[in-house]
Image (cartoon, grey):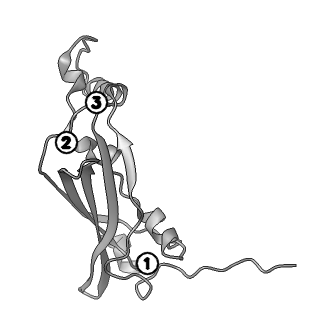
Amino acid sequence: MSAVEQRPAYDWEHARIGDVAGAVTVEITADAVRQFNTTQQQAAGLPIEPDDPDLLAVPPVMVRVFAPLRRRELVAENGAEYPNHPTPAIRWSCRFFNEPKVGDRIVSVTRVQDKYIRKDRHFLEWRVDANRNDGTPVAEFTYVNLWDRGRAEDRNR
């Protein structure tokens, strides 16, 4: 009988600046953009015209679809288990270099950009670089998570 392999938790001590997840490629398809934009218009209560060319414009917020934040994959590729407690998002920011377009194949890589302590709390900052498959930069975004377990006093905030 073989023992089940126990992988360490990706806790503060395990996480390293520069840890990286392998690249992933996502094609921006017309169907995906049309569906995303249609859903947004429906949620806003706006009328939808099926032939509207704006339905094929790639909105900036769609960067999270074509360049996904792959934290769990990064943790697994670095030989660990994702923490079994919430890791709330603290901040997200994004910069665009070139407008993404339907038909682009986007190659993105997720890495641990920074880890820091503020007010006795531990934070991990993730960075995703998104380029066209020819290497042209499209966008980069950072995402910061609180990496500690919640505290009793958090419930009163």
Determine the secondary structure under disc 2: helix
Three-letter residue code for mark 2: Pro
Crowdedness near tag 3: few (<14), some (14–19) or many (≥20) residues, C-alpha within 10 Å:
few
Three-letter residue code for mark 3: Gln
Q: Which residue is mark 2?
A: 60
Crowdedness near tag 1: few (<14), some (14–19) or many (≥20) residues, C-alpha within 10 Å:
some
Q: Position of residue 154 (x, y in %)?
A: 35, 74
Counting residues from the start of the chain, the first of labels 2 and 1 encountered is 2
**Nearer to us: label 3 or label 1:** 3
Q: Which residue is mark 3?
A: 40
Foreground of the two, 44 or 99: 99
Q: Which residue is mark 1?
A: 149
Determine the secondary structure under disc 3: helix
Q: Position of residue 155 (x, y in %)?
A: 38, 71
Q: Is residue 130 above or below residue 114?
A: above
Residue 103 is left or right of residue 54, and the answer is right
Foreground of the two, 108 or 157: 108
User: What is the spatial separation of the Cα atoms under label 2 and label 1, in whole angstroms?
Assistant: 32 Å
User: What is the spatial separation of the Cα atoms under label 2 and label 3, in whole angstroms?
Assistant: 13 Å
